[in-house]
């Protein structure tokens, strides 16, 4: 369902993780592009392969209207394009479609999601992007479900290891030098997979030596007290930290600075947010506009 909605919306899923009562998804939203009528039809067919009582228009009817032109065709294009290239519309479609499926499957009614989704703007390349992807994919490890993220089938990393082409493309994108669509080869994917696995288990650490064991809450607290909160990046990623849910903007100081004015206007704040370096370990220059909540969760 994630892949289908992403295809329709024109966004690229870089990684994701689906847990029992919530999910995380890391998406790249390209700049606004001109979408041809033939591409609109193709995307529509991905999301609506056949008409339903909720979606009356058929592909043939839509194609005829677009071909004919005029105000009706323009309005049809406008409505479809308004749902594309936008994170909020992407999430709305995912949540709505999943709610319909879940309610029908479990014979229930009503709303399913407790609150609106949280979004964090992430710098589209380098350390920030890689760190966010690792945080997402370590969710089942932190939850004690698996000891190795590759063994959790409902995440982008495991899907990439299993050979799914779109998930592999996302992983190569994460480890590319620039935020642009990257066509992967077996060689580039192999390098990206090795680099990502090293990040997940700790740079320079041997996964076989570690046996993929997670860092438990008690052990993490002991290290925090002994080392005054200074932890290697890969270890701290196994703990739930506020940056990745409430950080609002994550990236280099220059990247965060470039979006503070827009964030201030959108949140109707009187004063501009203060850019702060991420604390707790050496985050290689990452900054946010929210302070770290000094609390560790298993």
Image (cartoon, grey):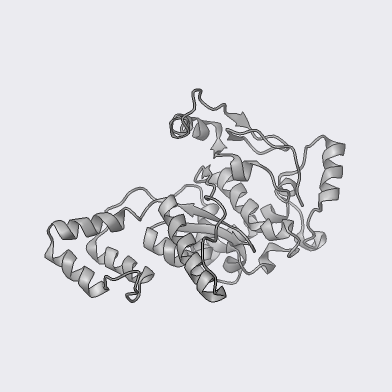
Q: Is residue 59 visible?
A: yes
Q: Is residue 161 above or below residue 194?
A: below
Left or right of residue 210: residue 104:
left
Q: Which one is in front, 157 or 271? A: 271
Give coordinates of residue 164: x percent, y percent: 53, 70
Give coordinates of residue 277: x percent, y percent: 63, 31
Left or right of residue 294: residue 287:
left
Left or right of residue 42: residue 4:
right
Q: Is residue 72 above or below residue 59?
A: above
Residue at 44% in and 56% down: 92
Residue at 24% in and 58% down: 77
Q: Is residue 262 above or below residue 84?
A: above
**Quarter where residue 159 is shown:** bottom right
Residue closest to the far front:
109
Number of marks present in the image shown: 0
Q: Which one is in front, 55 or 187? A: 55
Q: Which one is in front, 276 or 19? A: 19
Residue closest to the far top:
271
Q: Is residue 182 above or below residue 154?
A: above
Give coordinates of residue 136: x percent, y percent: 62, 54
Give coordinates of residue 248: x percent, y percent: 55, 39
Q: Is residue 164 visible?
A: no
Residue at 53% in and 67% down: 186
**Quarter where residue 157 is shown:** bottom right
């Amino acid at each position: 369902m994630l892949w289908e909605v992403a295809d329709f919306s024109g966004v690229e899923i870089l990684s994701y993780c689906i847990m029992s009562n919530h999910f995380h998804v890391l998406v790249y939203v390209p700049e606004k592009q001109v979408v041809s009528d033939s591409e609109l039809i193709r995307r529509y067919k991905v999301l609506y392969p056949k008409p339903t009582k909720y979606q009356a228009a058929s592909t043939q009817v839509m194609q005829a209207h677009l071909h004919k032109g005029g105000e009706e065709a323009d309005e049809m294009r406008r409505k479809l394009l308004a749902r594309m290239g936008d994170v909020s519309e992407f999430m709305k479609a995912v949540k709505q479609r999943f709610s319909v499926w879940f309610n029908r499957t479990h014979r229930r009614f009503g709303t399913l999601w407790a609150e609106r989704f949280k979004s964090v703007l992430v710098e589209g390349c380098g350390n920030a992007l890689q760190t966010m992807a690792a945080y997402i994919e370590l969710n089942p490890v932190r939850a004690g479900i698996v000891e190795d993220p590759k063994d959790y089938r409902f995440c982008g990393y495991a899907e990439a290891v299993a050979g799914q082409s779109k998930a592999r493309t996302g992983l190569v994108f994460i480890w590319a030098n620039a935020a642009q669509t990257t066509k992967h080869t077996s060689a580039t994917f192999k390098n990206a997979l090795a680099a990502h696995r090293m990040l997940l288990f700790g740079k320079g650490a041997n996964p076989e030596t570690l046996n993929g064991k997670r860092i438990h809450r008690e052990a993490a607290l002991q290290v925090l007290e002994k080392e005054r909160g200074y932890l290697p990046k890969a270890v701290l990623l196994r703990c739930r930290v506020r940056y990745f849910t409430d950080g609002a903007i994550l990236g280099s100081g220059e990247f965060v600075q470039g979006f503070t004015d827009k964030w201030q206007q959108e949140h109707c704040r009187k004063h501009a947010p203060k850019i702060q370096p991420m604390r707790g370990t050496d985050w290689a220059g990452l900054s946010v506009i929210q302070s770290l909540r000094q609390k560790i969760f298993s």
